[in-house]
Image (cartoon, rainbow, N blue to C red):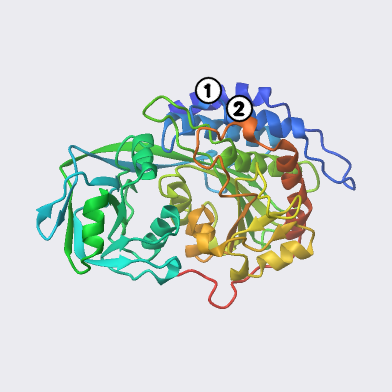
């Protein structure tokens, strides 16, 4: 706790650089989101000083302290029953002490490389998947993918199908990913939480891959070397605005604080769009809601930690909510609103999993420029911090501007890459619709088959 007091003091000074709270307008006047305020906050969050806000690092904690100082300056308070603005959890990070081995029918394959590590040794009979429609992937123990679909989409689908081991052909892309992430991405997990199933992803040299793909049914085994464990702390920051009616429920507005930190070669992954832009939206919406008459419903404003390594901050919050989950009317996550998908109408955003609940139609009817999920096959609904809340039963969606941007998870995701006019307009466009939701009796519900399983 002493460290957080120190970080809070450091971030308070940074908050002054972002400008003081905007004076409250007349109650009848519409709220205006200022581009200068948006720019100042995004510039700090995506600066060299925060070193890419790596998941479960001191830099993530500094970002949380900065947001907390903003919340306090706007008049938000800690959530009911919380001693302060911070919620922390322990993350266990395994580290390999050697090279993983892939064996086919008992024979070790030279040149195999483990990109994403599982919780332990895995294996089974190989099934070849060649279709471009990823949803037809079988739920097998071991899948050899020759599909032309994006490796990212293939990997996401394998996880959703609970495949134990996914084998890809070695490529320039996979080699670059391995180098960029500094080796194997091992399966970290929350202390005290079930570790669950994690799909391992390994690559084989072209010759070995083609030989295996031509012989479905082969026995494939992934063996891990001994491991050590590191313990780190991830940080959520939670601000609370008490509503006028304690029986009206609570609205949850969120974004994730963290990004990819510093690569092994020293490159800072600034994460301006992913997701400093969303954090700025949360701050600015808090500014708008504290700048006028208190809403009917209470509002939680949250910046989650460790989204990038497994949605751990939101998972922890869903298991340890600041208010009962049954009281949360809806959760809207803001993710990558700093650039717009050129396929969308000018100024438009999209809502992930739009067809899953009645929230999309309601927000749209009250002025939100949100289109339907632009590409359901990419599973964006499951890939952001709304997902753990949705699994817990809360109607939870993510609003985004463009998810597969050219800067996605690239060193080029810097402050300079942000489209500030679009970003400011995006935040502005959600003030009135969210004000309506916070003042109404409307409670969104899941559509038939829309609620994900726990």
Residue 304 rendering spot, x and y as whole percentages: 51, 44
Secondary-structure class at tag 1: helix
Left or right, 408 with respect to 251, comes to: left
Left or right, 260 with respect to 413, comes to: left
Mark 2 and mark 1 in contact? Answer it, CB < 8 Å.
yes
Front-lying residue, 236 or 387:
387
- Give the tally of numbered discs: 2
Instruction: Give the residue at the far left of this rendering.
Output: 106
Residue 250 rendering spot, x and y as whole percentages: 63, 57
Sequence-earlier tag: 2 or 1: 2
What numbered label is drawn on residue 282?
Answer: none
Q: Residue at x 47, y 29 (%)?
A: 59
Looking at the rendered image, the quarter that the C terminus falls into is bottom left
Disc 2 to disc 1, C-alpha distance: 8 Å
The answer to which quarter of the image holds residue 179 is top left
Considering only vertical position in the picture, is 188 above or below 35?
below
The residue that disc 1 covers is 49
Can residue 324 be seen in the rendering of this structure?
no
Secondary-structure class at tag 2: helix
The residue that disc 2 covers is 44
């Amino acid at each position: 706790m002493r460290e957080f007091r120190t970080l809070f003091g450091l971030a308070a000074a940074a908050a002054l650089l972002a400008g003081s709270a905007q004076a409250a307008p007349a109650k009848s006047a519409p709220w205006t989101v200022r581009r200068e305020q948006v720019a100042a906050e995004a510039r700090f969050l995506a600066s060299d000083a925060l070193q890419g806000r790596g998941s479960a690092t001191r830099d993530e904690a500094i970002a949380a302290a900065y947001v907390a100082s903003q919340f306090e300056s706007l008049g938000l308070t800690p959530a009911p029953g919380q001693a302060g603005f911070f919620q922390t959890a322990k993350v266990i990070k395994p580290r390999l002490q050697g090279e993983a081995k892939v064996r086919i029918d008992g024979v070790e394959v030279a040149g195999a490389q483990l990109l994403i590590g599982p919780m332990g040794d895995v294996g089974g009979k190989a099934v070849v998947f060649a279709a471009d429609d990823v949803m037809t992937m079988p739920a097998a123990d071991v899948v050899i993918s020759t599909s032309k679909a994006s490796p990212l989409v293939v990997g996401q689908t394998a996880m959703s199908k609970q495949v134990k081991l996914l084998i890809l052909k070695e490529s320039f892309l996979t080699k670059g990913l391995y180098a960029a992430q500094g080796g194997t991405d091992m399966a970290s997990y929350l202390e005290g939480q079930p570790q669950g199933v994690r799909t391992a992803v390994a690559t084989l040299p072209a010759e070995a891959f083609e030989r295996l793909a031509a012989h479905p049914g082969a026995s494939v085994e992934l063996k891990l070397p001994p491991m050590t464990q590191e313990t780190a702390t991830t940080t959520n920051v939670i601000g609370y605005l008490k509503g006028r009616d304690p029986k009206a429920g609570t609205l949850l507005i969120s974004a994730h604080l963290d990004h990819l930190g510093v690569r092994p070669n020293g490159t800072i992954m600034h994460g301006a769009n992913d997701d400093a832009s969303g954090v700025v939206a949360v701050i600015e919406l808090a500014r708008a809601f504290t700048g006028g008459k208190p809403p009917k419903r209470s509002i939680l404003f949250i910046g989650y930690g460790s989204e990038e390594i497994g949605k751990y901050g939101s998972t922890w919050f869903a298991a340890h909510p600041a208010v009962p989950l049954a009281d949360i009317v809806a959760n809207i996550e803001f993710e990558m609103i700093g650039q717009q998908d050129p396929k969308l109408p000018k100024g438009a955003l999209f809502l992930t999993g739009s067809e899953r609940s009645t929230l999309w139609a309601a927000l749209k009817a009250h002025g939100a420029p949100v289109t339907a999920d632009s590409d359901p096959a990419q599973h964006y609904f499951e890939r952001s911090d709304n997902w753990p809340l949705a699994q817990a039963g809360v109607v939870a969606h993510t609003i985004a501007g463009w998810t597969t941007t050219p800067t996605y998870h690239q060193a080029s995701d810097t402050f300079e890459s942000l489209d500030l006019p679009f970003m400011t307009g995006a935040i502005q466009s959600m003030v009135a619709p969210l004000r309506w939701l916070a003042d109404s009796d409307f409670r969104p519900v899941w559509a038939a088959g829309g609620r994900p399983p726990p």
